[in-house]
Amino acid sequence: MKSAVKISDVIAFLRQLEMNNDRVWFKAHREQYDAVRLPWEQDVERLIQMVGNYDANVRGLGLKESVYRIYRDTRFSKDKSPYKNYFSAVLGRGGRHTIMSGYYIHFQPDNLMMGGGVWWPERRILDQLRSLIAAEDEEFLKIVENPEFTSRYHWDSNALKSVPKDYPKDHPLAEYLKMKEYIAMMNLTPQYFDCDDWVERVADDLHALLPLHDFLNYVFEV
């Protein structure tokens, strides 16, 4: 099946928005925005269905739960630009409000990427994730050292400078225990989308994250 929108068209619009991030320009180009947004949302809906075929946590997710709005909340920000210069969506139980490990796609000029994991968990959840990794170290390493994972994804997580006090400094999984979140990302190029169906390609590559999600989400099921 052919994708509804060309990502190059999305990026072209977002580049214009980046240079003209104000309400007057956006209002004048609303039709151009809708011309890329609506088919992009159709593709995200199909992506949800495809990922839902192998991940039950995505099954039944609504588009509005998944996709971020283009409007920025500027109340507490020094940057008063009214619009985001990217399209993005979260696929997982609860959509963009999830606290669980889920999938993320981010389409922005010069910053195309996808991946997923647990983003900025609260301290209680973070402690549980670290305990799980330490207790099930062999299972965890089997997942994150699998070529299906390492050939696609790299860790993009904020981390402590030293190992948490509950663990020895020379712990064999020290680098993972120092993480303050567990995010694995895959940087993409425009050429990645030079195919008839980028949705299918993204769904295939996101599939490699399923074992990591299943492992991390164990803390939410006990």
Image (cartoon, rainbow, N blue to C red):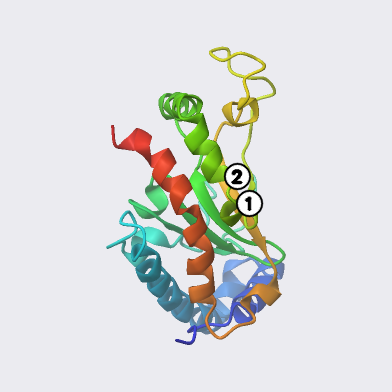
Q: In the rendered view, would you say 14 is above or below 116?
A: below
Horizontal and vertical percent position of residue 16: 68, 74
Work out how far the residue at label 2 is from the one at label 1, CA to CA, in angstroms. 6 Å
**Quick one: quadrant of the C terminus?**
top left
Residue 80 can be seen, yes or no: no
Quarter of the image with the N terminus is bottom left
Q: Position of residue 151 (x, y in %)?
A: 65, 56
Mark 1 lies on a secondary structure that is helix
Residue type indicated by callout 2 = Glu
Badge 1 density bin: few <14, some 14–19, many ≥20, Cα 10 Å: some
Residue 102, compared with residue 187, is above or below; it is: above
Query: Looking at this view, is 57 or 17 the one in front?
Result: 57
Q: Quadrant of residue 42?
A: bottom left
Count every numbered label the image shows and give the total.
Answer: 2
Residue 145 tag number: 2
In this picture, residue 217 sits left or right of residue 106: left
Closer to the camera, 161 or 41?
A: 161
| Front-lying residue, 94 or 179 | 179
Q: Disc 1 designates what residue?
A: 150
Whether 177 is drawn above or below 115: the answer is: above
| Disc 2 secondary structure class | loop
Residue density around tag 2, few if under 14, some if 14–19, many if 20 or more, within 10 Å:
few
Q: Is residue 199 among what the camera can see?
A: yes
Looking at the image, which residue is at 52% across and 81% down? Answer: 197
* Disc nearer the start of the sequence (2/1): 2
76, 216: nearer the viewer: 216
**What percent of the width, then of the height, locates residue 208?**
51, 57
Q: Which residue type carries mark 1?
A: Thr
Label 2–label 1 contact, CB within 8 A? yes
